[in-house]
Amino acid sequence: MARTTTFPFRYATLVICASGLLITLPLSIYLGGWYLLPVVFAALTILGVRDMLQTNHTISRNYPILAHFRYFLESIGPEIRQYFIESDTEERPFSREQRTIIYQRAKNVLDKRPYGSLLGMYDEGFEWINYSMRPVEIKDSDFRIEIGKHCAKPYKASVFNISAMSFGSLSANAILSLNKGAKLGNFYHDTGEGSISRYHREPGGDLVWEIGSGYFGCRHEDGSFNEEMFRKNAALDQVKMIEVKLSQGAKPGHGGILPGEKVTAEIAQARGVEVGKDVVSPARHSAFSTPIEMLDFIEKLRELSGGKPVGFKLAIGHPWEWFAIVKAMLETGKKPDFIVVDGGEGGTGAAPLEFINRLGVPMTEALLLVHNTLVGTNLREHIAIGAAGKITSAFNIARTLALGADWCNAARGYMFALGCIQSLSCHTGKCPSGVATQDPRRGNKLDVEDKSQRVYNFHKNTLDALKNLLAASGLKHPSELGPEHILSRTSKTEIHSYLELFPYLEPGDLLKGETGIRVYDKYWPDARSESFDPPEFIRELRKTKLR
């Protein structure tokens, strides 16, 4: 390759800065002032020389000084797009319209819109709920669902609650605000797998204690399950239900490590681990390895808790694994009191890009699979279903309940209520709003009194909006919602209700034989209650590329 003999113009900025230094330095000394100019030129010249000598960044070597302008513009790209380029309805991951309605309801200010919808009502995928010419009057928006009807201590939950977010992921003041808001509004706050911290306890709001594979708050030193520690925490009156986390939508099938430098005394106390030592959350549980063992574990937790409702949370993956759990219920007669379906669109847990974008079933299909399977095996009336996945508005709640859920949880919606601005820096510890950080200089700026009221307002005003939506549709309670109520545009000229769009099983269909729905007919017969292993034909397929 021939070498260029002319001086590269891309070095002009460095030459100009060096020349400026040579000119301004003697002039400043001679005139006895204007020292800032040579200082600036000197700094830029040193930066340019450093750029040319370093070997890590080729762009900096080829474009000394100028490359830093590119790096700066690249670093503020998300903010530029969010504030100046994205439309009000573009969800990346939440649209400005979605965020704004949460902010307005949290602040208890006017949440009405003028001049009509910004949505494309004739676009494929547009959804709505039909109104009734005989609307009804609903006096109270405090909609409830009873969970654990056959337990010694059943729980009547709100239909809209705070999803799992741990202390350690969120700041102390964020946890305090969420729990105090839950206390004010009489709805529950899921602890996340980081267990019950003093910040969960202090306000006194209802808790759902989530137990993950690390068994935080109920573990031995080796990380195995500790019955006595569990019994002690589960006995707290504030703990209303126990949720075993099998997986989460943001990163299903993925464990994690909390580095020792982040394990403070407060986090160590809540989780039952040592200060300053790495804390491992395995990818799977050690207390059970088969569907039947999992149900035995749930039965044990219910007994140790004194009869409180116990269930599990999962993101749907291989269908035969979910079917194996249901078959175990049928064969043993042991059942969870509830199941929370976490959609693949979950996002409060930082995760590898491939996990966030491409792993796990989205909430709609996951919820349909869980609901249909329980209906088809005559188990649905015994097990309540919660669902989570980008739920921020009354219509989101109505749509999810119509699909088959009994109640909804939200995480990021309540983070917005706390003041989150979607800076997408949750994993860096530099959250500008003090929500997702353990830096006390940031987290302590979050005012608990103000933000807890906003959490309460968001919950209250969203349920008021749900009440108005139901009343206009001629319904008196969210439990009346079904797939026939939600309409979806499938083309410019075609509209279908969810009842027509999605397959729904009749009670007992799976027990009778073939359903005519491929996922059930293909995987249900070979699912086994004693193992999560794939069916034989799947194992054979994995041995060859010849399909």
Image: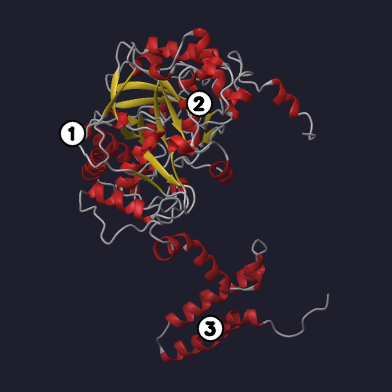
In the image, 126 versus 104, the foreground residue is 126
Badge 1 is on which residue? Answer: 140
Which numbered disc covers residue 246?
Answer: 2
Disc 1 marks a residue whose amino acid type is Asp
Gap between marks 2 and 3 measured at Cα: 63 Å
Neighbor class of circle 3 (other Cα within 10 Å; few <14, some 14-19, many 20+) is many
- Residue 43 higher or lower than 306, as above or below: below
Q: How is the image coloured?
A: secondary structure
Crowd class of label 2 (few under 14; some 14 to 19; many from 20; radius 10 Å):
some
Quarter containing the C terminus: top right
Q: Nearer the viewer, mark 1 or mark 2?
A: 1
Circle 3 is placed at which residue position?
A: 21
Answer above or below: position of 336 versus 26. above
| N-term mark: 3 or 1 | 3
> Residue 39 at x, y = what percent?
47, 78
Q: Earlier in the sequence, mark 2 or mark 3?
A: 3
Q: Residue 516: percent from the left, percent from the top?
A: 58, 26
Q: Nearer the viewer, residue 385 or 477?
A: 477
So how many labels did they put on this image?
A: 3
Q: Residue 293 appears at what percent x and percent y? A: 54, 13
x%, y% of residue 416? 33, 47
Q: What amino acid type is highlighted by mark number 2?
A: Leu
Q: Do residues under tags 2 and 3 come within 8 Å of each other at their CB atoms?
A: no
- Three-letter code for the amino acid on which mark 3 is drawn: Leu
Residue at point 36%, 41% (across, down): 396
First in residue order: circle 1 vs circle 2: 1
Q: Quadrant of the N terminus?
A: bottom right
Tell me the SS state at disc 1: loop
For the residues labelled 3 and 1, the Cα–Cα distance comes to: 73 Å
